[in-house]
Image: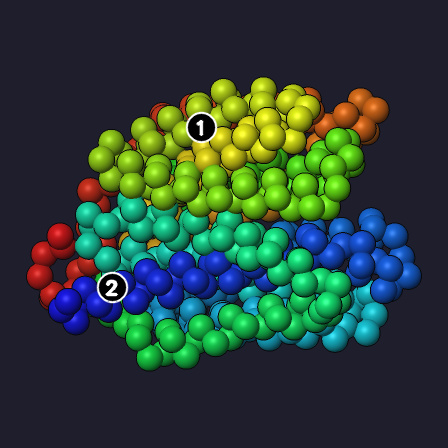
Amino acid sequence: MNDRLKAQRHVVAACYLGWTLDAFDFFILIFVLKQVAASFHTTLTPITWAIFLTLLLRVIGSVIFGRLADRYGRRPTLMANVLIYAALEFATGFAPTLTVFLILRGLYGIAMGGEWGVGASLTMESIPDSWRGPVSGILQAGYPSGYLLASLLNYAEPLLGWRGMFMVGAAPALLVLYIRSSVPESPDWTARTEAERRAPILDVLRRHLPLTIYAVAMMTAFNFFSHGTQDLYPSAFLAGQHGFDPATVSTIAVVYNVGAILGGLFFGTLSQRIGRRMAIVIAALLSLAAIPLWAFAGAPVWIGLGAFLMQFCVQGAWGVVPAHLNELSPAEVRGTFPGLVYQLGNFIASGNATIQASIGAHMGHDYRWALAGVAGAAGLVIAVVVGSGREARHVTMRRADEGPAA
């Protein structure tokens, strides 16, 4: 294996692990909401503000770390980002009061918001063009991989306690040693002039205003698609409405996260052959066929199958996003643009859980139609918006003098 190929594989591995471990740190809280509430002698509702703050402030992190990546390089920014979110996760385990806990989760949200955009731009600018589709699926598979790791760690909660689980969440800091020793800087960023590295983000966005609006609308639909099929599903739907025990809920969660990983890899790879837009549209439309089992089945085995198929399609569509957004991005702000529009879409969709919970409450805590309605609408909107957009699969990102891209 030549040195260039080895370095490219290290980039992919590091950025996949960065997003996996970031998602792992985020999803730890999902499993210990009740324990945290009991520790601070409060109800569940105030603790859910931690999730809201994390999601709300991710957009700030996308701007801060994205601009640092465009100015000072993808590699050092990624290392700083990983260290910061790992340190904040560790500190959360020592939070003495609810107020401190919420502040730390808000700050963690800023750090979480920076990782995806920086890691995706570093990867897409470093690999051969022919790798982009499969690698896009690998990168996005990091999100359900992190969810899966958090699900497995939850089995140790009786031993670790919620504070110990957050302390385990500091493990991503070790990833920095790997990045420092094995991951090179983006060749595209290295080839940029000083003027390009200092390009004012607002000026670039104004010049590309239609693209920016389009990308934010697309990512809003994508975030409703993912959060609308995940946020209330384990607790409100599986445990609350169906009354499944924790072991059954955990098993179904593991099953649908495996489906999510496989879907991202499948549709990401498929997009390299048929195009990004077509792969996304197919995945979004196929999700509609999974809704009857996913939302309306009664037996755990059929619900598990429906959940597997739904997340195969949802994260299958998402598996194309890292490549598609980076290919659409203006080159001079590629460290900022993908993460910014992603997190702006996430910001707009942050009220999803409240919307679905309100619908379910008005229907006697029956969440089937709330889940099906959001998932179905989001899938249709994605199919229309992406299908009417631009294909940029053949754009070149690697400008360094290292030979033609494969």
Q: Quadrant of the N terminus?
A: bottom left
Which one is in front, 236 or 305?
305
Q: Position of residue 78 (x, y in %)?
A: 42, 69
Answer left or right for 8 relative to 48: left
Give the residue type at disc 1: Ala
Residue at 81 percent of width and 74 percent of height: 96
> Is label 2 in a helix, a strand or a loop?
helix
**In the image, which disc is placed on residue 8?**
2
The CA span between labels 1 and 2 is 30 Å
Which one is in front, 393 or 182?
182
Q: Residues within 10 Å of mark 2 (few under 14, many from 20)?
A: many
> Which quadrant of the figure has residue 133?
top left
Answer left or right for 163 relative to 172: right
> Which quadrant of the figure has residue 386?
top left
Q: Position of residue 301 (x, y in %)?
A: 60, 30
Residue 192 in view: no
> Is label 1 in a helix, a strand or a loop?
helix
Does 234 appear above or below 75? above
Mark 1 / mark 2, whichever is N-terminal: 2
* Circle 1/circle 2 CB separation < 8 Å: no
Q: Position of residue 336 (x, y in %)?
A: 42, 57
Residue at 66 percent of width and 26 percent of height: 299
Give the residue type at disc 2: Gln
The residue identified by callout 1 is 284
**In the image, which disc is placed on residue 1?**
none
